[in-house]
Amino acid sequence: MYTHTEHRKAVVIKIVGPVDVQNAQGFREWIVSEFLENDKKYIILDMTHVTNIDSFGLGTLVGIYKRIVGVDGYLKVVAPNKNIRTLFEITGLERIIKIYNTVSEALREEE
């Protein structure tokens, strides 16, 4: 479902498939244990291959975001499909989680 690479201080996580009630909790736990507990607090989610996200998945992203900003990190999203982008707009998530077209664009803009 997900792989990751490190670029300077950021971790780029490539997600494939849905982010939903079936896997979102495990995804959050993996991010916390693998990255946040190891002081890797700059996370970029490459959503190029995410097929769907449900309300539980959105809630999980909000929880991850809150945890990351609590330690002065950032969470960025790359290339969500049109439906997911619309969902971010409707829920107002695009106002707190920045969306980028490419990973290189997200990496260039350091906050």
Image (cartoon, helix red, strand yellow):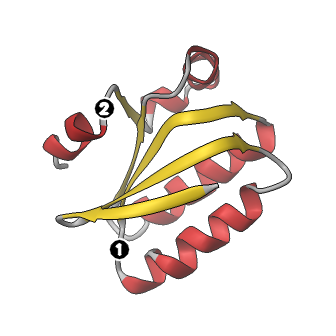
Left or right: 13 in relation to 102: right
Where residue 94 appears, x then y in whole percent?
A: 47, 28
Q: Earlier in the sequence, mark 1 or mark 2?
A: 1
Residue at figure coordinates x 77%, y 56% from the top left: 23
Left or right: 19 in relation to 63: right
Which corner quadrant of the image does residue 81 belong to? top right
At label 1, the amino acid type is Lys
> As displayed, is residue 62 above or below residue 89?
below
Residue at figure coordinates x 64%, y 64% from the top left: 28
Left or right: 28 in relation to 11: right
Residue at figure coordinates x 21%, y 39% from the top left: 104
Left or right: 52 in relation to 88: right
Count of numbered circles in the view:
2
Which corner quadrant of the image does residue 90 belong to? top right
Where residue 20 appears, x then y in whole percent?
A: 78, 45
Q: Residues within 10 Å of mark 1 (few under 14, many from 20)?
A: some
Instruction: Describe the element under mark 2 as helix, strand or loop.
Output: loop
Residue at figure coordinates x 40%, y 85% from the top left: 38
Which is in the foreground here, disc 1 or disc 2? 2
**Is 94 or 31 nearer to us in this picture?**
31
> As displayed, is residue 52 above or below residue 37?
above
> Distance of mark 1 from mark 2, alpha carbons?
21 Å
> As displayed, is residue 62 above or below residue 100?
below
At label 2, the amino acid type is Thr
Q: Residues within 10 Å of mark 2 (few under 14, many from 20)?
A: some
Dot 1 corresponds to which residue? 40
Instruction: Describe the element under mark 1 as helix, strand or loop.
Output: loop
Where residue 53 appears, x then y in whole percent?
A: 71, 35
Dot 2 corresponds to which residue? 102
Where residue 1 appears, x then y in whole percent?
A: 64, 55
**Is 28 or 63 nearer to us in this picture?**
28
